[in-house]
């Protein structure tokens, strides 16, 4: 999946659920495939990473991006 596609999904979900107010500076595929981490959001850098195993199913990918967007609005430590 191309980075532009990830950004497009991110933008669509941000507009739909957060009125465009969720702040994410970058979204990318994780360099390492981790078994127990589907995605992560860094509250300091505002970067989102998505596990590469999820890009095959668009519904799951959208859910994980939505989930990480929630962390951008309500940080979880």
Image (cartoon, rainbow, N blue to C red):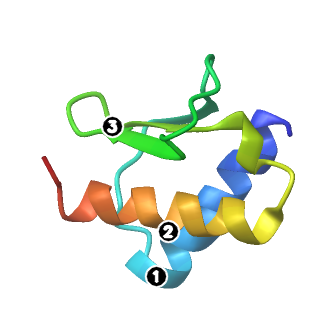
Identify the residue shown where x is 41% and y is 45%: 24
* The N terminus lies in quadrant: top right
Label number found at residue 66:
none
Quarter where residue 64 is shown? bottom right
Q: Which residue is mark 2?
A: 14
Assign a secondary structure to mark 2: helix
Compare residues 47 and 57 and report the one nearer the observer: 57
Compare residues 43 and 50 and report the one nearer the observer: 50
**Which badge, 3 or 1, is on the more N-terminal residue?**
1
**Crowd rating for badge 1 (residues with CA inside 10 Å; few <14, some 14–19, many 20+):** few
**Crowd rating for badge 3 (residues with CA inside 10 Å; few <14, some 14–19, many 20+):** some
- Name the spot of residue 62 as percent of width and height, x first: 66, 66
Label number found at residue 17:
1
- Name the spot of residue 26 as percent of width and height, x first: 51, 34
Instruction: Tell me if label 2 and label 1 are in contact, CB under 8 Å.
Output: yes
- Name the spot of residue 60 as percent of width and height, x first: 69, 66
Compare residues 20 and 56 and report the one nearer the observer: 56
Assign a secondary structure to mark 3: loop
Label number found at residue 46:
3
Q: Residue furthest left?
A: 77
- Name the spot of residue 53 as percent of width and height, x first: 75, 41
Identify the residue shown where x is 39% and y is 77%: 18
Q: Looking at the image, is 45 positioned above or below residue 32?
A: below
Q: CA distance from mark 3 to mark 1?
A: 18 Å
Compare residues 30 and 17 and report the one nearer the observer: 30
Position of residue 76 in the picture relative to residue 38 (left or right): left
Position of residue 42 in the picture relative to residue 59 (left or right): left
Quarter where residue 12 is shown? bottom right
Identify the residue shown where x is 63% and y is 38%: 51
């Amino acid at each position: 999946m191309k980075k532009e596609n990830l950004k497009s999904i991110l933008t669509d979900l941000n507009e739909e659920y957060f009125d465009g107010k969720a702040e994410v500076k970058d979204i990318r595929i994780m360099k390492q495939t981790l078994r127990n981490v589907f995605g992560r959001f860094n509250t300091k850098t505002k970067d989102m990473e998505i596990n590469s195993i999820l890009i095959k199913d668009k519904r799951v990918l959208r859910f994980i991006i939505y989930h990480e967007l929630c962390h951008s609005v309500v940080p979880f430590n």
